[in-house]
Amino acid sequence: MSTAKLYQQNVYIKEWDTEIESINENGVYLCSTAFFPEGGGQSCDIGSLAPAGEDTDRSAALYKITDVQEDGDDIVHKIVCDDGSTFELKAGDKVHCTLDWDRRFDNMQRHCGEHILSGIFYRECGGVNRGFHMGQDYMTVDISLEDKPTNPEMEKPEEITWELAKHCELLANRVIWSDAPVKVFRYDNREDAENMPLRKNLALDEDISIVCIGSPENAADCVACCGTHPQTAGQVGLIKLYKVEKYKGMFRIYFEAGKRALMDYSKKHDILTDLSNSYSSSIEDFPEKIRGQEEKLADVKNQLFHIKKAFIENECNKLNDLLTEAEESSVLVYPLENLSLDDAFNMSKEYMGKSACKGKLILLYSVPDTSYILVSDGEIKCGPLVKEYANFYGGKGGGNDISARAIFKTSDDASLFADLLGKHLK
C-alpha cells in the first residue's frame, strides 16, 4: 500500500488524523501524510505526531518528525522523542499530525519564486535552468544560455549582465504583482504532459506533475515539478537578486524570495541607515559622502607614507651611528617604539646582505608587535638562529641567511630571546 500524499491534494493542510501503517528501522510509515519528502531541490517538511485525542500543541508534542524521505511509493518519517524515550506507538494506532507551517510556507514561497525567475530567464534570455539550490542564506539557479528567447523582442544574449538580470528581476516581480494563478496539472503519461508549454524537456514517462504559473496560453513558467507551491504568485511576495557570476560556462544567479527576501532587505536597510546616520548623511547622499571620505583618507595615507619614510630614514641614521660605536659587540638590539613589524622589515632592507652590518646581527625590535626583524650581511645566519632558538620562548618565525622574523607573545619572551642570542654570539 502506497502512502496517500495529502500535499498533492491540498498544500494548505496543517493538521490531520491518520493511522500508522507500519514501523521499521527506517522510520514510521503513515496511511496518509501531508509531510512533503525531500526532493526536487526542496527540503522536507517537519512537524510533530501525537496519539489522536491527546494534547497536540507543538510544545507538548510527544514525538517530533525531523526528516521525511521517499521510499518507493511510500513516505517514511524519522521520529525523535522529546524526552529521549522510546517510540511506543505501533501499526494501527491512530495519530494526530501537525505540520511546521512556517517552514512549509517558506519552502513554498522560495520554490515558487525560483519557478517564476527561471521562467523569466527562459523567456527573456533563452536561459535553461541547469541547477537549483535552496541554501540557508540564499538560493541559486545556474542558467545556461542555450535556446532562443521566446520573447520575440529579445535577442539571444552572449552573457547575463547585471543589467539584464535586473531586467528579469523586475519582470519576475511583475508576475507576483499580477497574482497569477499557480496550478498543478497531473498526467499519467509523457504524451499528454508534452502538450503543455514546457520550458524544459521532461525526464519522466509517467506520474508527471506540471506546475504552471499563469494560464497555459500565457504562462510565466511551466515545468515539471513535484514540490509544493502556493495557489497564487502573489503569495511569493517578493523576489530579490543578490549577484550574478560566471560558473562552469553558465551564469549562477544568487537570489531570495518571500519572507526571507523581505528580512534580508530589512536587515541591510537597518545597516545602511545606521552607517549613513553615523556620517550625518541621508541614505541617498551616503555613497557620495563615502567617496569624499575615501579621498580624504587617500590624502592622509599619502602624507603618512612620506612621514613614515622620513622617520625610518632618521632611524637608519641613528642605527648607523650605533653600528660605528659598537664595534666589539656581535649583536645589536635596536628598539622601534612606534613602528610595526612590517615597518621594521622595510627598514631592514637598508642592511640585508650589506657591508653596513659589518659582521653583526641587528635585531630591529617592533615594540608594538613584540617581535624582531633579524638582519645581517650573511656572515651570521639569521634564519637558522630563529629556527633553533625562538621556540625556547614560545616564539615562531623564519627567514633566510640575511633576514628573518621572530614573533613573540610577550615583551619578556622577546627580551629573553635577544639575551640568548647575545650570549650565543658573544
Image: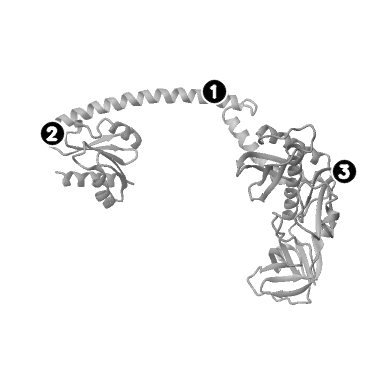
The answer to which of 192 and 2 lies nearer the viewer is 192
Point out the frontmost of discs 3 and 2.
3
Where is residue 348? Give x, y as percent: 28, 33
Q: Is residue 73 above or below residue 419?
A: below
Going from N to C along the chain, the mark reached first, 1 or 3, is 3
Q: Secondary structure at mark 2?
A: loop
Point out the frontmost of discs 2 and 1.
2
Q: For marks 3 and 2, give the CA distance.
A: 95 Å
For label 1, count other residues whose C-alpha is less than 10 Å away and answer few (under 14), some (14-19) or many (20+). few
Q: Which residue is mark 3?
A: 217
Taking the image as shown, residue 49 lies to the left or right of residue 214, namely: left
Q: Quadrant of residue 168?
A: top right
Taking the image as shown, residue 164 lies to the left or right of residue 423, namely: right
Q: Amino acid at mark 3?
A: Glu
Going from N to C along the chain, the mark reached first, 2 or 1, is 1
Q: Secondary structure at mark 3?
A: loop
**Can you see residue 57?**
yes
Where is residue 211? Give x, y as percent: 81, 51
For label 2, count other residues whose C-alpha is less than 10 Å away and answer few (under 14), some (14-19) or many (20+). few
Q: Which residue is mark 2?
A: 327
Q: For marks 2 and 1, give the CA distance.
A: 53 Å
Q: Amino acid at mark 2?
A: Glu
Q: Secondary structure at mark 1?
A: helix
Q: Residue at x 79, y 31 (%)?
A: 153
Where is residue 398? Give x, y as percent: 30, 45
Q: For marks 1 and 3, give the CA distance.
A: 54 Å
